[in-house]
Amino acid sequence: MSLRPTLDFLLYDWLKAQALTSRPRFADHSRETFDAVLDTCERIARWKYAPFNRTVDTEEPRWDGERVILPQATHEAHKAFAQSGMLSAAQDHDIGGMQLPYLVEAAAHSFFSMASVSINSSMLTVANANLLQTHGTDMQKQVFAHNEFSGRWSGTMCLSEPQAGSSLSDIITRALPDGEGFEGDPLGPRYRITGNKMWISSGEHELTENIIHLVLAKIPGPDGKLIAGTRGISLFIVPKKLVDADGSLTQERNDVALAGLNHKLGWRGTTNTLLNFGEGRFPVRGQAGAIGYLVGRPHEGLRCMFHMMNEARIAIGMAATMLGMAGYHASLDYARNRPQGRLAGPSGKDASSPQVRIIEHADVKRMLLAQKSYCEGALALMLYCARLVDEQHTGDAQQADDARLLLEVLTPIAKSWPSEWCLEANSLAIQVHGGYGYTRDYPVEQYWRDNRLNMIHEGTHGIQAADLLGRKVLMEDGRGLQLLAGRIEACVARALQVPALAGHADALAQALVQVRDATRNAWSTGNPAEALANAVPYMQGFGHMVLAWIWLEVSLALPQGAASTPAELGRQSAARYFFAYELPKIGAWLQVASSRDATCAQMSPEAF
């Protein structure tokens, strides 16, 4: 079963990707060039990624004392991906990019995530380089970002520390000026970095000539003490191997050392590391301390890093979506071919009749419809967010500002919703397979294991929920939520004119009222502790409302009143399923947020 027809419908029939070619930045493109990119990526994913998904799961990265060893298939896949030009797909022509719309780039990347998410670990390299393109100096762009876009070097994001986890306020990695002339280095103000980072994806490997770490650290104040909280955080480029200002490698190791590999439930093809900075194993110029170059201004590191974090969060949402989609396709194929049981007729079951395929049983159809509604709905959401990125970069001033604010509100949903519900789709895919699904003879157990990470990394569910309710729906006097509500109301108004969709429109309008009421009531006392105690249920209700809106938008893009194709009937049924089975769930979630229920907050730790 191919993903391509679904992508084509969402890109061209719904989101009108071809209309972007009327904008100056994309004027060299056409639907034909977009299709050529999709064809190329689909082909590479099919031949270089998918056949080796089980290989990279069973042959985990290992450290031989000198280097991290990965399967040869990972090297071949990375080489093919870099040669395709997709690392710089959205970049300017003058630095070797294609100037593709981000919408098309996101769609093309979906093939790799579906084929093998743990081979497809390039997202941090692109996000790293994009951050430097926005916040770096011209020299930092030329030396570091452009070499990452070419595939010559790769990149990481180094935030978490063993004692701090997700609490960035508590990081203790230090950065001290490297000598009196530290400000004269052409690559940026030069510091010595000391500290420990963990959970660093792709932190050590030999897929590329160099690895460019972006590291959060604190510059001590005049009293020599670290500044408390996130105010003191700065951002540094810390290359694995030191480089000259012309981008050539010096072959001198920086003082960055692998402290260990994490052995994971899933995503086993991607190295996940603990790194020590400045421990003295590789002293530079006779001193301990890794060389790092300041990005932006001192103490503004978190603001810069959020550029990368937000991009990574949307990429995680896409990864979760495509893992769910892979499980859906596998379980659909299994259900179409597995005979078992008989259907009950008016007088019961006839044991002498042939067995039917399990896809004919109503409960199996329920599980398949749930997966379809979760995964295709999530894919539509991710592509909608990608379309907003294009609006932000190429729309007029009002379009760009609206897109910016809508992305602020939707990013926690784009990360959290697929990571919860496409994981549930993977669980249902195992259930469709029955006992076989729980064995390694079928791929669905690996899809579940791989997807379980996505609720955790790049900000856990609780962090996304606190961001949504504690910041995003309130920012700029609630204008982002008002913008989203306006788009939902416009969709409802159009759908009310279509008899087959009027019921869905009414249900969505009621859901919007519930979300607005819950937002207002959660903050009615002005006490953050009370408001945020039930932030996750609030986010779940909010997310289901957003997905119902996306499904109604998709439904409006389907032909109305004409004889439907099987694909169109499938989308209509998935939308009906979501409105009948899923949207009604939001009442319970939003009620605890609206009433500021204190059950969890007041639970005594001793009572557990």
Image (cartoon, grey):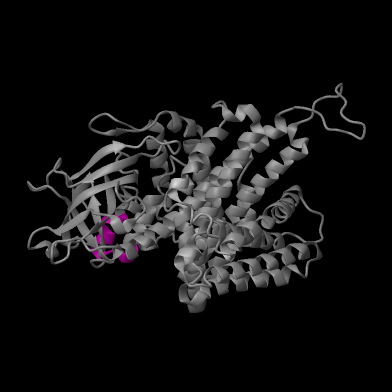
Q: Position of residue 116 (x, y in %)?
A: 49, 39
Looking at the picture, tell me which residue is in the foreground, 171 or 113.
171
Tell me, yes or no, if residue 331 can be seen here: yes
Range shown magenta = 133-146
Could you tell me which residue is drawn at 58 percent across and 64 percent down? Answer: 595
In the picture, residue 383 is in which quadrant? bottom right
Q: Position of residue 39 (x, y in %)?
A: 54, 47
Q: Position of residue 10 (x, y in %)?
A: 62, 56
* Figure check: 271 above or below 28: above
* Figure check: 150 above or below 136: above
Q: Position of residue 467 (x, y in %)?
A: 45, 62
Q: Examine the residues drawn in magenta and state their main secondary structure.
A: helix
* Figure check: 394 above or below 90: below
Residue sticking out furthest to the right:
347
The quadrant in which the N terminus is found is: top right
Looking at the picture, tell me which residue is in the foreground, 278 or 33.
278
Horizontal side of residue 427 vs 530, given as left or right: right
Looking at the picture, tell me which residue is in the foreground, 202 or 106.
202
**Residue 135 painted magenta:** yes
Tell me, yes or no, if residue 325 can be seen here: no
Residue sticking out furthest to the top:
352
Looking at the picture, tell me which residue is in the foreground, 37 or 106.
106
Horizontal side of residue 379 vs 287, given as left or right: right
